[in-house]
Image (spheres, rainbow, N blue to C red):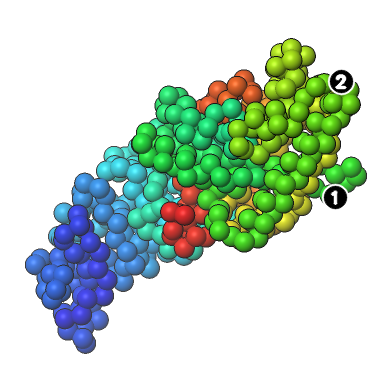
Amino acid sequence: MHAAHAVAVDGERLIGQYRPDPSSKNRCLGELDPDGFIPFRSVCPSPVQDWDSVLPSPDGRWWVVTSRDGIALYEAETVWHGAVPARTLLRPDEGCGVAWIDGETFVVATAFSSTIVHTDGRPDEVVPLGVGLGGEVAQSGVVGGPPVASASMRIDLHTHSTVSDGTLTPAEVIAAAAAADLDVVALTDHDNLAGWSEAAEAARSYGLEFVPGVELSCRWYGVEPSISLHLLGYWVDPDHAGLREELARLRGGREQRARQIVELMRADGIDVTWEEVQAYAAGGTVGRPHLAQALIRRGLVATVSEAFAPSMLGSRWRVPKPDIDVFRGLELIRAAGGVSVFAHPQASSRGRIVPESLIVEMAAHGLDGLEADHEDHTPEQRARVRALADELGLVATGSSDFHGTNKTTPIGANLTDPAVYTALRAAAQARAGDDLSR
């Protein structure tokens, strides 16, 4: 007797295909003894020939079977009677990844979409993903993972802590996320990964899923003057040498810029000191919001936003900082096993924005998504970003860009669709070789 394929069910039973004898062309389906592969019960021939995998639902009632015939949904007990599948989902030439959300719902990721499938007869929900993300999930052969976000989950993928220019510590950011009833939260400090450990530990204590991230300071040099833009990188390898070196360079540049701004402020009669600004940063990377705090403490402005007026930090005391070429940034995120999202791409209220032709070029160089729902986007801009993401085969995310009291936007103000989050996580897992524990 020869077992062809086997899958553990409920952690105890082993379901597999076998040939009654080596010369048999037909395979039988059996519940097997893990030691001797002797069927306790079986059906011959197997109702599914040459399967690739079987993924039972959490309650064991359903099986999702992938085979050369495509993907099929079976009611588990009927399989033993040679029953036909309850549904056939895909043609055999469409690769996919499959994972259960709960006992009645599972997701199928192909090269072009993520389909939420309900076993109770409700209509399927199709979410476009794009070739870049869905294709990687499909090619990775992931079955049974990566974990799939429930349709009711609240997900915020853009926050900042005192490690960069936020006012809450990483642990306090997580506490704020829990208080806002979030289920998943990413910490994306500017050019710095130092808050990950503290945030991850806090997330475990609150029962939240933590996404390690970073917001890279990038620049497009295709026009003069060049244009600043930000890339969000998720699940990057913190030990990737190239990324580590660039982040260190950027942080050093930020510090030198802040020192120069302090001197400009002092030359205009503002009695600020470098030591004072460092104290506002609380051990994190010094940024312009920390310089704004010095102005607030002196009663010169009431808010951080006011401090960025042209007569102050917005222009008079503005000093350029080193950035990463945007294509180098995309390359680093991908080389470090992460996925990339262009942050607030249409936020014209912040200054000059890049043309859509650049976003097309970025997509061709491995960009995975666009941040559509952001507080600095108008409803029209949000709609345009989503349309562009759809045209380019990218995902569209939503997030708060939370900075604590440095900005007025509360954590969880904008959210990412759970199906989109599942796609991003699946792509990162495929790139990381199924290990996102780093």
Reply above or below: 332 against 317. Answer: below
Residue that sits furthest to the bottom in the current view: 23
Tag 2 secondary structure: loop
Q: Nearer the viewer, residue 298 or 214?
A: 298
Residue that appears at 53% across and 41% down: 195
Picture coordinates of residue 316 (x, y %)? 88, 27
Tag 1 secondary structure: loop
Crowding around mark 1 (Cα neighbors within 10 Å: few <14, some 14 to 19, many 20+) is few
The residues tagged by marks 2 and 1 sit, at their Cα atoms, a distance apart of 38 Å
Picture coordinates of residue 3 (x, y %)? 22, 76
The label shown at residue 318 is: none
Nearer the observer: mark 2 or 1; the answer is 2
Q: Pick the quarter of the image with the N terminus.
A: bottom left
Q: Nearer the viewer, residue 130 or 436?
A: 436
Reply above or below: 183 against 88. Answer: above
Q: Which residue is tagged 1?
A: 222
Q: Which badge, 2 or 1, is on the more N-terminal residue?
A: 1
Occupied quadrant, residue 70: bottom left
Which amino acid is tagged 2? Answer: Gly
Reply above or below: 100 against 349. Answer: below
Picture coordinates of residue 2 (x, y %)? 20, 80
The label shown at residue 269 is: 2
Which amino acid is tagged 1? Answer: Gly
